[in-house]
Image: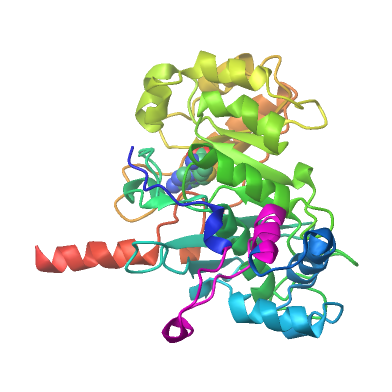
């Protein structure tokens, strides 16, 4: 696995500026944690006794209101607003492309500002899925992925790097901007309206590109900001982190982030799971399920989701459904059956509808909720496992042309 280390938060402290450098992009406070803001404020000379109050003000403007300019911050003194604007920005990462599916699903290709040593900003995809009773934002945690699961499109894209905490949070801010989800913004034309008083985005799932538990610290810190009651205010019960099974980080996720857990299971025998999810060779089923049994905070009210992609002729027999039920005994679980979403060149097909129904019935009759996930946004390749950023696709195309 190759990770390019991401230098952490200190980049928020503005470097001393030479006169000829003033045109260089200022560091953005979008995605900042409270600790980042403290550092930023201290860096521009705000007295220690004021820091707490100033953080609270900035936090409200940035995350509750979605301010795009320091000038909007009415309760912050003019002097401090000017000072902030001199050293920082509220710039969002760029939306390099937006696609809207016939079913209202939206997919954004988000381009981050280049970090140290990057010639060009990294890009990830982020998807918003409106439903009648909720709006789910699917965020990415890495650029690309190292896991090479054989049925997943993202797995064919090499890992470029981990996202920073700021970059993870910024996806939620960008999404709220795009769908008019901050107070006073206008709703999109063809989106579903949220219930009275609520926001479009009610749920966040770390089911975009990457393996969140390989980027544990940044994901944990991002969850804290997303769930902060004075800011973006998502309930932790509505933030789900999905993993292919990085066992050593499962306990810490529950203890330190308190997020809901989803496991990409997809097979009930090690031999098959080794092929579908190669990480299984390192952390086989027994070890993985033991970690789930011990997941901090799991209960009948806070169940662990097991994702199971339905692959025709591979993992979809009634016997496998019964084995699944047996394996999950003793774990507060719900099972999410995902019809396989095809992508160009994929070596699998989706199971027939009847097979999926039979499988779902067996699981349901054993007492588990077993919703079949309706594929959303397939027409724009925004469904599970279809994400792969455009840059990579363009690069691949360029290779084909030159080879
Ligand atoms: N790496 C993490 C986060 C990605 S979540 C994980 O594996 O859980 C993305 C979910 O979509 C996972 O459950 C993944 O197994 C599933 N998935 C991947 N490719 C798919 C495809 N082509 N069709 C349906 N689901 C897919």
**From the image, which quarter does the N terminus lie in?**
top left
- Reply above or below: 88 against 338: below
Q: Nearer the viewer, residue 396 or 3?
A: 3
Q: Is residue 322 visible?
A: no
Q: Residue at x 58, y 53 (%)?
A: 165
Give the magenta part as a residue range: 13-42
Q: Point out residue 307 in the picture as x, y percentages from the top left corner.
A: 57, 36
Q: Residue at x 46, y 46 (%)?
A: 210
Q: Residue at x 74, y 80 (%)?
A: 81
Q: Main secondary structure of the magenta part?
A: loop
**From the image, which quarter does the C terminus lie in?**
bottom left
Q: Point out residue 28 in the picture as x, y percentages from the top left corner.
A: 58, 70
Q: Is residue 42 left or right of residue 107?
A: right
The tally of labels here is 0
- Reply above or below: 126 against 82: above
Report if residue 87 lies within the magenta region.
no
Write down the quadrant of residue 278 in the picture. Answer: top left
Q: Point out residue 79 in the picture as x, y percentages from the top left corner.
A: 76, 83
Report if residue 27 lies within the magenta region.
yes
Q: Is residue 378 left or right of residue 358?
A: left
- Reply above or below: 110 against 332: below
Q: Is residue 402 visible?
A: yes
Among all residues in the image, which is located at the extreme left? Answer: 403
Q: Nearer the viewer, residue 54 or 214?
A: 54
Write down the quadrant of residue 182 in the picture. Answer: bottom right
Q: Point out residue 115 in the picture as x, y percentages from the top left corner.
A: 42, 63
């Amino acid at each position: 696995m190759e990770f390019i280390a991401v230098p952490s938060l200190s980049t928020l402290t503005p470097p001393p500026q030479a006169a000829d450098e003033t045109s260089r992009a200022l560091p953005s406070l979008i995605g900042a944690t409270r600790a980042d803001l403290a550092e930023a404020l201290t860096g521009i000379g705000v007295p220690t006794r004021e820091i707490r109050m100033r953080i609270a003000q900035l936090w409200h403007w940035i995350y509750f209101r979605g301010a795009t300019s320091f000038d909007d911050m009415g309760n912050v003194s003019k002097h401090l607003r000017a000072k902030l604007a001199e050293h920082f920005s509220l710039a969002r990462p760029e939306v390099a492309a937006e696609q809207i599916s016939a079913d209202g699903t939206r997919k954004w290709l988000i381009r981050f500002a280049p970090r140290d040593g990057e010639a060009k900003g990294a890009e990830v995809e982020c998807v918003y899925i409106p439903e009648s009773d909720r709006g789910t934002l699917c965020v990415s945690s890495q650029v690309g992925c190292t896991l090479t699961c054989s049925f997943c499109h993202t797995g064919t894209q090499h890992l470029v790097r981990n996202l920073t905490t700021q970059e993870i949070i910024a996806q939620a801010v960008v999404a709220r901007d795009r769908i008019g989800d901050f107070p006073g913004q206008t709703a999109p034309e063809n989106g579903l309206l949220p219930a009275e008083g609520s926001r479009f985005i009610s749920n966040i799932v770390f089911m975009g590109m990457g393996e969140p538990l390989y980027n544990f610290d940044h994901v944990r810190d991002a969850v804290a900001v997303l769930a902060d009651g004075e800011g973006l205010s998502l309930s932790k019960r509505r933030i789900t982190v999905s993993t292919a099974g990085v066992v050593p980080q499962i306990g810490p996720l529950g203890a330190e982030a308190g997020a809901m857990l989803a496991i990409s299971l997809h097979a009930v025998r090690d031999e098959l799971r080794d092929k579908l999810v190669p990480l299984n060779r390192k952390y086989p089923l027994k070890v993985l399920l033991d970690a789930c049994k011990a997941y901090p905070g799991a209960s009948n009210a806070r169940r662990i989701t097991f994702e199971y992609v339905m692959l025709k002729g591979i993992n979809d027999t009634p016997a496998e459904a019964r084995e699944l039920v047996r394996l999950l005994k003793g774990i507060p679980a719900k099972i999410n059956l995902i019809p396989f979403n095809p992508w160009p060149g994929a070596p699998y097909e989706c199971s027939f509808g009847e097979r999926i129904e039979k499988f779902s019935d067996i699981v349901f009759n054993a007492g588990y909720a077993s919703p079949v996930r309706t594929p959303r946004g397939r027409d724009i390749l925004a469904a599970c496992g279809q994400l792969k950023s455009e840059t990579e696709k363009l690069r691949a195309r360029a290779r084909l042309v030159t080879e």
